[in-house]
Image: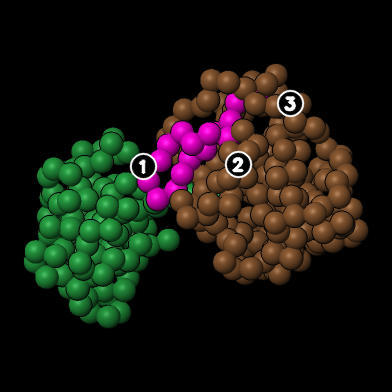
Amino acid sequence: MDVLVGVGGTAASWDALEETAERARIAGDAVTVAIYETDDVAADPETVEQRAREILTAADIEADIRHLSGDPGGALVELADGEGFDRLVLGGSSRSNLGKIRLNEISEFVVLNSKTPVTLVR
Amino acid sequence: MTDRDGSFPETPAGPFERPPRSIVDADGHEIDLVRTDLAGPDRDALVAMYERFDPADRAQGIPPVECDAIDRWLDDLLCEHCLNVVARDGDRIVAHAMAVPDENGTPESIDAYELAIFVESAYQDVGIGTELTKTLLGDAAAADVEYVWLTVERWNEPAVAVYREIGFEVVESTSFELEMAIRLSA
């Protein structure tokens, strides 16, 4: 399966990348990592890419790394649908102190707009 | 961590009665509304309620489904300055309302509390949820809490109506859930 995983550098996005890499190692998926900038993360895209490469290396996975510009939700959907990916994976949610799951804006947009099946990693 | 997006209403709501209280629900049951420390027999009765819980009444991932996860979640609700009240029909706990601070710290430094309430299905639509929520707000006001917020799924119109009746206002409506908030009078 051709899997696109969106990574903005949040804790949830690292979980999503680790789970995607682990599944790819078992299932033989081809992984593409799409790095985007988000206001929730202070790190610059190069730092995010470096950490992504470390996670991929640790899982023994080779992956394409792409950098997205503009609105992250729109760019993720355009890439996933436009290049025929089989699955789009995102972290995309957080939990409040009380325990309620809340989707972030990017995952709401992607879930409503993507033709490619979407997986939100919990 | 705070997940709050919106602001708070300018006009305070209340006053609300504090626990313990007794009410007669619309089915004629006498129901006690009391504080709980989530320990001992209360803990067992509460886990039992959440194990009976209708999956369709879950909201945004809580209560968790499996027993260990319910226990871990209840442990998180035991935090210092967390507020918990329950509705009892005899020994049986039939509803639970909770308020959890946005940050750790002293009551003076805590900005706002997130609220949630769960009522087991056999006891819904008889006024218990409304009265238990008000009772929790009474307990919160007594603890000098000024701001309380919650999120509710858009399609859950009965819940939104109850929160409005109590005095919550919608402060953020651009995502899947509505965010509602209330300002308590000192």
Q: Residue at x 64, y 68 (%)?
A: B54
Secondary element at image label 2: helix
Give, as a single range, the part of the protein colored magenta: B168-184
Q: What's the mark number on residue B152?
A: none
Q: Are marks 2 and 3 on the same chain?
A: yes
Q: Residue at x 60, y 26 (%)?
A: B183
Helix, strand or loop for the magenta stretch, by majority: strand
> Which residue in the structure is indicated by mark 3?
B15
State the residue position of label 1: B174
> What is the spatial separation of the Cα atoms under label 2 and label 3, in whole angstroms?
15 Å
Please, what secondary structure does the residue beneath circle 1 have? loop
Which residue lies under the disc numbered 2? B163
Amino acid type for the residue under numbered disc 3: Pro
Q: Residues within 10 Å of mark 1 (few under 14, many from 20)?
A: few
Q: Are marks 1 and 2 in contact (CB under 8 Å)?
A: no
Marks 2,3: beta carbons within 8 A: no
Residue visible at 74% across and 65% down in the picture: B122
